[in-house]
Amino acid sequence: MSSIPVPIKSRDEGHLHDLMSRSPFSSSFISSSPIAQESLARDLAEYPADEVETPEQNEYTSSGDESSEASTVGQEAQHSMTYSYRRPSFVAFGGTRPAVTPQFKDTAWLTKKERHESRNEERSLLRDNHLAPPKHPEPAKRSAFNRLYRKLFSTKIPKPMDDEETGPPSEISALLPNGQHESARSRHERLNRQWEQAVASGKIKTTWQREAKTLLRYSSPLVVTFVLQYSLTVASIFTVGHLGKVELGAVSLASMTANITGYAIYQGLATSLDTLCAQAYGSGRKGLVGLQLQRMVWFLWALTIPIGIVWLSAEKILETIVPEKRSAELAGLYLRILLLGAPGFALFEGAKRYVQAQGLFSATTYVLLICAPLNAFMNWLFVWKFEWGFIGAPIAVAVTDNLLPILLFLYVRFVDGMDCWDGMTWRAFHNWGPMIKLAVPGLVMVLAEYLAFEVLTLASSYFSVTHLAAQSVLTTLTALTFQIPFSISIAASTRVANLIGATLSDAAKTSSKVAIYGACLVGLFNFTLIFSLRNIVPRLFTDDLDVINIVSSVLPLCAAFQLFDALAANCNGLLRGLGRQEIGGYVNIFCYYVLAMPISFGTAFGLGWQLEGLWLGVALALGLVAAIEGWFLMRTDWERAVEAAQERNAAG
């Protein structure tokens, strides 16, 4: 989305417009929403202009190298990777897996750490191409093992034969005549010139080793975060499943209802903070980030009232939809208890965006590292040790939902993140219009992403309680295996966007190939794991032989589409990295809602294939998505993709 400045009506709105126009980060991959600018302009109008810091001031306040380096921000040349830096989203949704791959909003402002990271990427590529000194002096003589390791895993481009003797200057060689000391600013400017000259002359290449290393570094923390968040759902299903198939099916039914009528609403509306908080942070008035959080939390808490009414009435509602009354009764009980954790869940959804806007990606992970094991322990403690039975699971979830924002608050208070908090304010109850305008499309998209699999869960209840319980296990397993390729897809999107923005089309193409090969390996690994353990894994979730037999019979089909699942996720990520995410969205929606759903219902009910039929539609959709998006990527003109990015940059 291009940046469209709001009309300037006051000196503060003029200041905002000036910040936006001078930002070096208004790229084709980094959006500056006009609605967010409207909200920001209204908020900034209430602050004196002399209290608003420039992006340079609020990002770089330290001395030494950083401050010297910062003075050149805004003077970067057109090929700098800071122009196109893509922030990987650490906002895990949990709950269930999406049918349509989520589309994360880009941010118009980067933190000091992110800018430093983008420059480090440039320097790594310069070193790989022998255009900058290596980090460590190279040994005069290498062992046979070191030579083999270097040949297989070194990220460096092989040296031309005529360069073997000279090579780049080392860190200890004189970079300046007469032994003069090079200042931090001079070094930064020199590296900028080196980078610009190298890109302009086509000297920047990359290797599959460099791209594999980068994708692994980007995706590893994402895998940990996403798996931890999804484990909050798995723990309840895992624990309750051994009480009986009715209870297992009821948890699945309750989770489906909670996701559609509650959690998806919270998550979808909170996506507006991805833009609002990021632009508030970049405006120079960091306290506005906390203000945006307060507005969203009050808004979500207000919506908790109608959500609560639905959850309190869920038993009667489900009894009119679901054939099995006992399942509806238990699901209603589950939701009534779960309601106690809804305010905490809403607060955590907003708070995740608050810390991410500041570049504090590890904050959520640290909180989940505590809460995920604690949630599993509480499920066991309440359900089995205290013998509370079925109600122990929703109690554990409700406690965890309230504990998540508390621990995140403690992180912000005692570790990092208080810079953006100016305290509670009545202004949080004003200027809701732009926030709601920005939030509603996010809600629609999240519902579209997750509705397909929830509908399949509801459909399975029409076969029998046993089939509903089996569907619960199948959905849980396929969602769990999805977390790894999903994380790789975000990493691939980040890397390709950065390289395309820096006009490194060949490097972007190499990175995309590595991502595709990585997706194939992950898909084959998931296939092998599920297929080989198809008779063992179901027993971890339930003791009911009928449920175990059904799950075991459907798992080969679920295993078969793991390769398609991984490829579809990564193709979607690569399209987003190319700035063509709308293609992935259209393809996903068409394949799932126009093709997959009719096939699933036709084979499941019309042909009597039951769960096999429901999952057949999913498998065909994933295969078709992977084929269409893969075909589009194969036909992509990467040079033209760079030109398109430059055109969008020029448009603002």
Image (spheres, helix red, strand yellow):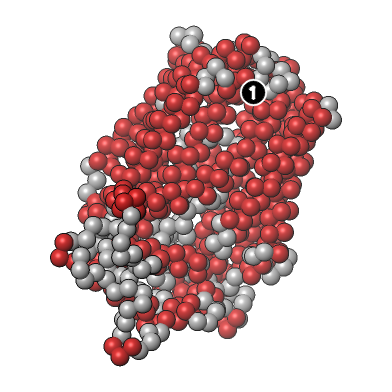
Residue 380 appears in which quarter of the rendering?
top right
Q: Please, which residue is most extreme toward the top here?
A: 608
Is residue 417 found left or right of 598 in the rendered image? right
The amino acid marked with disc number 1 is Phe
Which residue is at 55% across, 79% downward? 61
In terms of depth relative to the viewer, which is nearer, 75 or 182? 182
| Location of residue 132 with respect to 85 vertically, above or below | below
Q: Most extreme residue toward the bottom, as rendered? A: 178
Q: Position of residue 365 (x, y in %)?
A: 60, 51
Q: Can see residue 613?
A: yes
Front residue (pair 394, 282): 394
Quarter-wise, where is residue 229 in the image? top right
User: What element does badge 1 sit on?
Assistant: helix
Q: Residue 352: x and y, percent?
A: 61, 54
- Residue 627 versus residue 437 in the image, above or below: above
Residue occupying image coordinates x 47% and y 44%: 487
Residue at left 32%, top 73%? 170
Q: Nearer the viewer, residue 182 or 81?
A: 182
Q: Which residue is mark 1?
A: 541
**Residue 524: horizontal and vertical position, in percent?**
40, 30
Is residue 161 rendered to the left or right of residue 585?
Answer: left
Rendering coords of residue 477 (x, y %): 55, 28
Visible residue check, residue 652:
no
Q: Quadrant of the N terminus?
A: bottom left
In the image, residue 185 sits, relative to residue 639, either above or below, namely: below
Q: Residues within 10 Å of mark 1 (few under 14, many from 20)?
A: many
The residue depicted at 72 percent of the width and 68 percent of the height is 423
